[in-house]
Structures are given as C-alpha cells and as structure tokens.
Amino acid sequence: MIQFGRIRGTVLAAVSLTVLLFVLSSCAGSPKQKAAPAGATTSSAVSNAPGGDVSGDESSGSSEDMLRAPAPPASKPAAPSATPKPEAAKSAASGVRAAAADEASPEFMLSEEAASGSASRGAPAAPSQSGLKAGYSDDNDQFNYFVKFLDQYKAVPHYELAIDERIAVKVVDSLGRAVANAAVSVSVGGKAAAKGETYSDGLFYLYPLELGAPQANSYSLEARIKGISASVEISRTGPRSLSLVLGAPRVVPSPLPVDVLFVLDTTGSMGEEIERLRSTIEIISANITALKPKPSLRFGMVLYKDRDDVYDTKVVPFTGDLDAFQKALDEVSADGGGDEPEDLQSALRDAVNKMDWNSDGLRMGFIVTDASSHLDYGQEYTYAASAREAKAKAIKLFSIGAGGLPLEGEYPLRQIAQYTQGKYIFLTYGEKGESSGGAEGSVSHHTGSNFATDKLEAIVIKFVREEIARQSDKPIEADEAYSDAQKIDTETREDTLSKLFAQALKDLSDYSSLRLGPGSKLAIMPLTAAQGSGEGTPAQAEYFGSQLSLAASKSKLFTIVERGDLQKVLGELELQLSGLADEDNAAKAGKLLGADFLVTGTVFRGSERYELFLKLLRVETAEVLAATKARVDLKLGL
C-alpha cells in the first residue's frame, strides 16, 4: 500500500488550535450547505491553464516598469474535453500526486463539470456530511507541474504571466535569517528592468521572460534595506537559486505589522463562505494575535459583485479594531450576480491600490470566489497587472476557489497566487471519496503534501502563522513531504515498489525548480547506503536502485540515458560508487554519461522501515532541483 502524506511538526499550538476549532464548530452547529454543481462527482475545483497577453495601466506608478502593453484575452473557447478515470483521476486543482499506474493517461484530468465548462450554481445536492473544508496547492513548490499545467490548458481565456523561467534569489542577514521587505532592483545592461520587495522568507523571484528583454543572458540584482545593500550578478544559464547576504542582522519591527485582507465575492451563491468568515473571525484573530513575534493585526475587505449590481466594488479599510471589523462583516450580504463571471479585476485593482497596506510588516490577501472573472470588459488594469504590482509591493495573495468553480475561474486564480508566492486553496463541503482524501489502497488519491482537508479558518490561520514564524528566531518546524509504501497481500513486492518509484520520479519532476520535459536526458545513478545504516543495507540499496531504474525506463517524463559505461566513468574520475552521494562528483559523472539531469539517493535502515532520500540534480550546475523522501516497509526489502 502506498500513501502520500506529510510528517507533521509536533507543535503544541497546533494541537491547541485543533481542539479549539473542534469545540467551537461543535457548539456552532453545521454551516449552511453549498449549492453543488449539477451532476458533479466531487466539489473540488479541477483543472488549470495559462494566459494571453498582459495588460497594464501605464499610470500605475510603482509597477509601471513591470507592465507590458494591454492586449485583450483570447475569445472564450469551450473548456478542454477530458474524461476522468474513476480509479486514477488526477486533479490539477488539488495538485493530486497519484502513482503513475497508467503512463498513457493525460497529464491532467478534469472533473465532469470542469470538462463541460458548465458548472451549475443552481439547486443544491445535499453533501454526504456537513462541514466546510479546504485543501491547497503550492504551485511555487511544484513549479514544473504548474508550468506543464499552464501549457496543457493554454486555450483557456487568460492574461499572460510569463513564468516559464524562474530564478530565486533569497536575501538573508549576516546570521543567515530571511530578510523581509528588502527593496530589490534588477537591471539589464545598466538599464532598470524590474523592482520589488522580498517576502517573509526573503525570496524574490526573477522571471527573465517578464523583463521585456528576453534575449538578455545576464542580470544585476541589488537588495537594500535600511541603508544596507548587497548585489549579485545572475546568469540565465546558472543556478536556479541564489543567496544574497546583507552584512548586518535583520531588524524585525515590534510589534510586527500584519495586514490580512479578504477580497470577497458577495454574489448570491457565496452565502456559506461569508457566513463562515463571520462566525470564525474571532478565532482567526485570537490565534494570530497569540503568535510570536507579537503581531499588530489589522483586517480589511474589498467586496465585489459585478457591473449593474448594487455595487461593483466596496472597500472596507484596514482596522485593528476587531469589533469594528465584525460590524462591517455583519453588514455583508450575498445577493445579486447570476451571470456567472463577476468583476474580480476591479476588486484586485482596489485591493492593491486603495488599501493602506503597512510598509514594514507582512501583507496578505485572501481572494474568495466561486465564479470566473469577466475578461471581456476591456479593462486596462487586468488581474495580471494586479499580480505584478502586488509582487512589487510584496503583497502575498492566496486565492480560494469555492465549490463549482469552473476551469475559466481557477486558471487566473492559480496564476495570481503563484506569481505573488501565495497558494491556491479549494473548498470542499464534507463530501467523501476523492474530494476528501480518497479510498485506502495501494495508491491513495488527493493525499500528500499538496492536499490537506481542514476548516477554512484553520487554513487561513496556518498560512498567516507560517508568514509570522519566518520572522522569529525559532521558526516552526516545517512539514516534510514523503511517500509511504507498505506490504499488502493483494500486491507483489515489485508491483508496490514500481508504483512507489514511479510516484517518486513524478514528485521530482513536479517539484523541479527548472522546467523539464520528455526530452530531458536523465540518468539514474546507483543508490548508496548511509554510513552506519546496518548490515545488508548496501545490498538493499542496490535492489531499490534497480527498481528505481526499472520504473524510470517505463516513465514518459524523461528520456533515460543508459549508464552502461558507469564503471569506466567512475574509473576516469577515480571515484567509488559511494562518491556519487556528493553532488559535484555525481554531476561530473553525469556529464561524462551525456545526461542533463541525474537522480541520486541514499538509503537508511530504521527499526521498522527503510528511508530513501532522492534528489534530482542538474548536471550543468550540480544544483539540487528537487528532493523527495520515500518510506518503505521492511517487508518490501530483500
């Protein structure tokens, strides 16, 4: 049996939060049930796609140099046709990472309502149990997966955010801690090309195709904060991730300003989401204000409907007065709409430009909608322009797609979240089966590091908590993704391992920080046994390595390079097999083998299972592009 999950940090606060949420939800009763799509088999939004040309507002000030001339989106085509397989459907919305049991199946599958492009917002079909829940996809973490998703559904109407190439620069202080709000400027040939600020993790993503000089091969990047600066030269053919060290300890404001904005679709079908926020805003506030470093928390809202409704947009300014915010939230009602698309682009314009965001703290927005956005109004300030300006101001936008959201709605939401380093969150309504974790078996669907079912308020608290914790000297323990293989009677050892390693290869591909494809030349290097891991582990490593190579030979993710001359190559490099655990040595061997990428790994033996740590290396730079972990029942070994 293979399961995909995360190793959870043992944090007392998380336990307390779970208990408190359970008590409150039990006392409050069940939330209103959401109208389910007609004929839908699952309420999670399923699918994804990229964009047309970017439009920008030339008067937008701070992001003027980052915007390109406006262009209308492509005319709205029918959604791509695809039929999900009942046992192996892969949801692009949830980032589902099922074992690749059927290599011939399409890379992405659509749910029935998304495939037809006709997700209904009409009469409800009662879910099997009540309870608003949420799952999420981190499209920056699974970068290569997201790029492939954009290609797969590029016919969907959208505006362009050209993120195919990405170079990550992390700004840290003299002690190696992330520096937030550092001003970053990028130049090409001495001319300004981009500017922005770092997020809470110190990261600034550079997208060469977004700079207006796609032919350039080198860039100069400078980061500056409070009079301290540092710079780095970036090569387009160099590493995908770099560190830039500022020569002084960071200074975190006390209390730490934290702005949380809700961008709410308030049309008629959004009653449950609004009610849920209304009933849980106190617990959201209580949990955030109890964190360290101590935050100075403000809430705000941008409400939106559509043209010809009671209002198009309505701005509720940031306030640190929870009672005042609750009063404003109590006045929000769900009504109007009815024509499916709503005016999200106007709401994003107001969210980025009409809110009094803090300048030295953390800035987060949560977009909540179950409808696609009007892209046919000819607006000069598009959602792509909003995303660019939000990135320049280090405003992180999390987008939340409620049940019934069609592909045309999900695609832009995922673009916005990925570009601003947020996450795409999708809501379910208590349904069982695929939308709540899948059935137990040798392969579990909708599980793993990309999918976690929980109450919406818990998801909001989780992400805000992660942002604040990065400003602490004792950050919270990060979840670690892994795949878990257990022996079951109905499956042979080789079949289970085949699924496990097919999944591991897919993980490495999905989470690569560099775009990969079927033409990428990959060599599978022999796995090495960790020192002191016990007698028999070297033989076990050889066995697992053979199973990994076999799975790779069946995969269509890469072009596999034979390693028949490996011993000769090792001789030329004067290396033993154990030397391949070092990235530089492995990259030298890979170059002689004619590979572009390598998979290397180490095997540990524990009391109950083997643990395999696998890495995807880029031969040209010897950098690690992705890593994954597999836990294997001892019964599946030799």
Image (cartoon, helix red, strand yellow):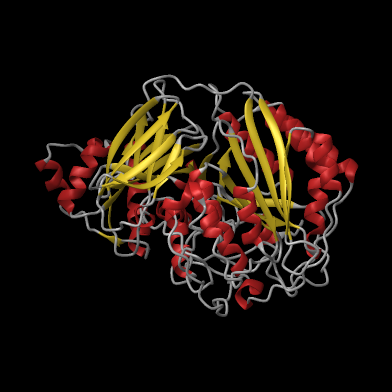
Q: Can residue 131 be seen in this snapshot? A: no
- The percent position of residue 443, horizontal first and vertical second, equals 56, 57
Q: Say if 626 sits above or below 334 in the image.
A: above
- The percent position of residue 304, horizontal first and vertical second, equals 72, 58
Number of dots carrying numbers: 0
Outermost residue, front side: 59
Q: Splitting the image into 4 quarters, where does residue 444 fall?
A: bottom right
Give me the residue at 35% from left, 62% from top.
Answer: 517
Q: Can residue 517 be seen in this snapshot? A: yes
Q: Nearer the viewer, residue 299 or 493?
A: 299
Q: Nearer the viewer, residue 54 or 546?
A: 54
Outermost residue, left side: 572
- The percent position of residue 211, horizontal first and vertical second, equals 36, 54
Give me the residue at 56% from left, 59% from top.
Answer: 383
| Left or right relative to 564: residue 425 | right
Give me the residue at 83% from left, 41% from top.
Answer: 326
Give me the residue at 15% from left, 52% from top.
Answer: 565
Q: Nearer the viewer, residue 555 or 577?
A: 555
Q: Splitting the image into 4 quarters, where does residue 374 fall?
A: bottom right
- The percent position of residue 46, horizontal first and vertical second, equals 61, 65
Q: Nearer the viewer, residue 285 or 256?
A: 256
Q: The C terminus is located in which quarter?
A: top left
Q: Say if 219 sits above or below 414 in the image.
A: above
